[in-house]
Image (cartoon, grey):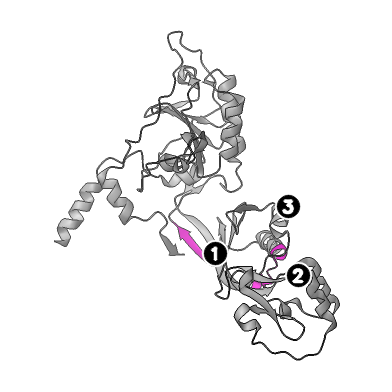
Amino acid sequence: MKRYAVAFILILALLPFAQACFSPTDNLAVEVYFNKPGIEYNLEPLKNAENVLIEDGRLIYHSHYDERVAVILWEDKGLHLRIEIPVKNWNSTVLSAKFTTPIIFPENSIEKAKELGWEVEGKYAFRKDSILVQITPQKGRECSKDSDCSTGGCSGEICTTRENAAKVVSICVYRDWYECLKLTSCGCVNGVCTWKPNGAFEQCLKEHGIDPNKVIKMPQADVYIAIYGQKELSEEKRAEIKELFSVLGISCVLENIKFEKWVTSMPEGIVNPYTFNFKEALRVEIEWLKESGILKISDEDIEEIVKVAKRGYAGYNSHIGWYETKDGKYAWIPYYESKDAKLVKCLGKPMTYQLPKGTVELGKPSPSQSPSTPKSPTSSAICGTGIVVLGVLLPLSLRRKD
């Protein structure tokens, strides 16, 4: 029976890969589907151009923003534009570390992190170039809202749960630092009842010789660090992480953190995808297509597309297009955010190509070629049976220790 199962999987593996599936190189690309009514295009000048590779109906040439990067154009119910960093290695190295630390974000810490050049993704994910720092607060069970907390003790100097406040007993000796309590309030922070930290309160405690950590109950948080394309932690990356920790109030010493090196199955680009400016590369290319008479699109649409563009917005699920939003309006958004999106979950075959030599030199458009208008997208695209099974059997991010 086992032999038949293996034979079945091998047969499925030989079936054609469905284009609708996720490709590992989508993480190295950004893609736009120009499906908004009124947008027109004429690819004839590119088909007659020098230094343009035509492969399987796709036009491939060097990016006008960075000649190391590929531009891929093709027609599929309309015009698709993909900017992709070619693959250098089909495996990439990642340094990672995980630890738990007490943390309460100081006032304006998120804004200060942004000033240092960190992008804030979600609530507590910080990214800068190839570094990702993900902070996950551990939810306490004492409280869920401020009203669950109250003060206790002779001078109301203890912040605890409302239930415990009536039972708590303290030495009835007034301390000068109690005046600092006027600068804060007792409330719920990450599921813990504590005096809420702020700069003025903490400074007041220090002026009275009191360690803020003795008064402020610090909730715990899990911190995960990942550094793309690094075999060891460089001094530059170490300094950037320390700087972020400083503004976030994390006192952990990096030298005591153990980093592990992993080799992942995700491809590594010839250009660092975390430092490459996908937004500007996309802007430059669309504007060049417009100036060359290949694409008819408004400046407003270009701005809206560039605004939403980011690394990984490519492929069937994540490409940018003109779609209906959840609230019934239309906008340039990634497909997976659109209303009633038909998503696929499988692994597709990455496109292989060799960039042509030299920059693109346009030919003359054919008089018989009229501009084409993209058709509305359909939801009929699905993955082939074989690749769906392979997508289950071959995880996208298999990791093995180096």
Pinpoint residue 195: horizontal percent, then vertical percent: 71, 73
Magenta part of the chain = 246-264
Kind of residue at badge 2? Thr
Q: Secondary structure at mark 1?
A: strand
Q: Pick the residue in front: 80 or 25.
A: 80
Q: Give the Cα separation between the discs numbered 1 and 2.
A: 37 Å
Q: Give the Cα separation between the discs numbered 3 and 1.
A: 25 Å
Q: Secondary structure at mark 3?
A: helix
Q: Give the Cα separation between the discs numbered 3 and 2.
A: 26 Å
Give the residue pinned by disc 3.
115
Choose the circle earlier in sequence order: 3 or 2.
Answer: 3
120 versus 363 height, above or below? below
Pinpoint residue 61: horizontal percent, then vertical percent: 50, 29
Q: Quadrant of the N terminus?
A: bottom left
Residue 258 in sight in this render: no
- Label 3 crowd (10 A; few <14 / some 14-19 / many >=20): few
Pinpoint residue 401: horizontal percent, then vertical percent: 45, 66
Disc ID at residue 184 = 2
Disc ID at residue 126 = none
